[in-house]
Image: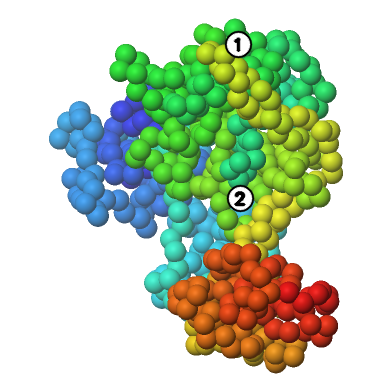
Amino acid sequence: MVGRCSRANPAQRHLSPITDEALQSALGRAAFDTVTAHTPSGGQHYVYTASGSTVHSGAHVLGQGIDIRAVGGYIVVAPSIVNGKQYIWEIGYSPRDREPLPWPAVLSARISVTHAPLNNKIPIPEGERNATLTSLAGTMRRRGCGFDEILAALSVANEKRCDPPLPVHEVEQIARSVARYKPEEVQRERKVTPNCERLNLLDPRTIRIERVEWLIENFIPFAELTMLDGNGGLGKSTVLLDLAAAYSTGARLPDGTQHEPGNVLIVAEEDRDSILRARLQVAGANLERIRFIKSVGESKRRFLLPCDAEALTECIKDWSAHFVVVDALFNHLEEHLSQNKSQGVRAALTPVAEAAHHTRAAIVGVRHWGKGTNNAAHRGLGSVDITNVCRSVLAVGEHPDDNALRVIAVAKTNLGMPCDALIYQLEPTDVQDDDGNTFSVARVGWQGSAPIRADSLAMAQTETDDECSALDDACERITEELTQGPKAARDLEHAVLKSVSMATFRRARKHLHDAGRIERRGGGVAGPVLWELAHRISLNPIESHSDTRDSIGADAILCDSAPVIEPPVLTSEALSAHGKICSTCKRIGRCFERSGGSWLCTVCDRAVTVGAA
């Protein structure tokens, strides 16, 4: 007969496959010095001879994973090859090297030696009944058995092996559920590879609880990676330099927090040293505690991630820095990596986050916003994994009620609590260069806090982007309509309002008019108001004066928004020879006479009465 087991290292013969200590002691190691073969799956076949009684095949008879193959069973014998994998005899333990040992008597005492199959005697305990019966049903279905056959087999197994038996309707449900699949669609039970590594467990009671330390409460944590997002021109870099200056001197931070003076590292663009120093200086920084990372190694190449992450960690330790600024973070990405791909982002940012953990430093990167989403945490350029790696993401935007103010709000935090946004404004401050010349740089003036959400900043920016896009569309529609020739105001509105709102139409019309791209004529006693492109406009006053074009020039466009030729100071006698002058703007144009004897051009058509020119 043959005993079959699986274990992690079949070459270690001193390890018994029997896990029962009493049985293992009774057997001894010599019981396994019999003919032995190794299976492709990592198991072993131990071959014995049995006489005097009939031993039947069974599964898990002597323990989990230890089967018996004798009467009613078979094994694959070495050197057979199955699915490209070979069974092999163990060196020194093949049938040519030794005879199989007799079946150990102690094993016969442990198992029932009967003519009945042993595996029918193994009970199925509560908690394993459904899975075991489903596996049995799957095996039968793969071999082509139908619902009636599967149900009959499951009923017998349920009655004789399940402890306690399942209700009849549950057994029927299992059989019906499996029988609805085609035989080839039923998946085989997944087996765990014997050589797979064990999972290491951690007892949470052994974990030390540590309080989160903050550079700015709920905004920038120490020992973590933070991202500062926002559109350009809002002062993101200036804000971080202001914080660096305050941290270097131990000054009060915008949330009221104060720290002992600390060292700062700054990674910035190569050509910004001068302006960075000027901003730090006007912010009152202690420059002895601040260093710029300019290059790497003797070749003085630029700083790149992730290849220089380890060097960054050592630099932070050597300088004893607890605040690190990387501006802009993805300008320092290795060329073969993309900020838009998850793999590249993880490769670049994970070492930076680990550097923050190991050094307990607050590392802050700068990133620009893209377009689209109203979710501030995911508005930044690049893969969403950037947000996932960072433990805090901050959003910068314009104050909703005052365009002169800026807002910093928490877009995402894994460590802090919801809090009010910080308010600041950029103030011009004079500074002298080394030659004694004075110029202005921006300085941050903190203005307290306000209950403003980060998503509202992103939403306002989205509305601005959408508004600009709608305005451009409306301008294009108006221009397209007027290329066909002058249109009455009502006709133009009717044509354009099919695709844009009235408010957007009016803003677009004013924008084009102020830019000198379209012109208005008519109105009042001159008839309905007409709009036309500026390049189509020609001199055509209400009272025709043929000599006006000859005097001013055939190509002149005489309207307020187009280039206007200022007339010389004319006497009243010369007016009839040069057309009429608008009583309001004093320019020659499309003037028509109003009641009271005044002349107005179409641009200055207002409800006013002035004296005749």
Q: Is residue 219 left or right of residue 533?
A: right
Q: Is residue 452 above or below residue 520?
A: above
For the residue labelled by badge 2, is the local secondary structure a helix, a strand or a loop?
Answer: loop
The local crowd at label 2, few if under 14, some if 14 to 19, many if 20 or more residues have their Cα within 10 Å, is: many
- Mark carried by residue 569: none
Q: Which amino acid, by three-letter code, is at mark 1?
A: Leu
Q: Residue at x 50, y 54 (%)?
A: 119
Specify the amino acid type for callout 2. Arg
Q: Is residue 27 above or below residue 368?
A: above
**Residue lying furthest front:** 573
Quarter of the figure with the N terminus? top left
Q: CA distance from mark 1 to mark 2?
A: 34 Å
567 vs 497, nearest the viewer: 567
Q: Residue 286 in the image: x percent, y percent?
A: 65, 10
Give the camera-side residue of 538 and 412: 538
Quarter the C terminus occupies? bottom right
Q: Position of residue 369 (x, y in %)?
A: 58, 47
User: Residue beneath label 2, please?
Assistant: 379
Where does the image place residue 590, in percent across and percent down from the top left? 63, 80
Which residue lies most toward the left here? 96
Secondary structure at badge 1 equals helix
Give above or below for 41 relative to 355.
Answer: below
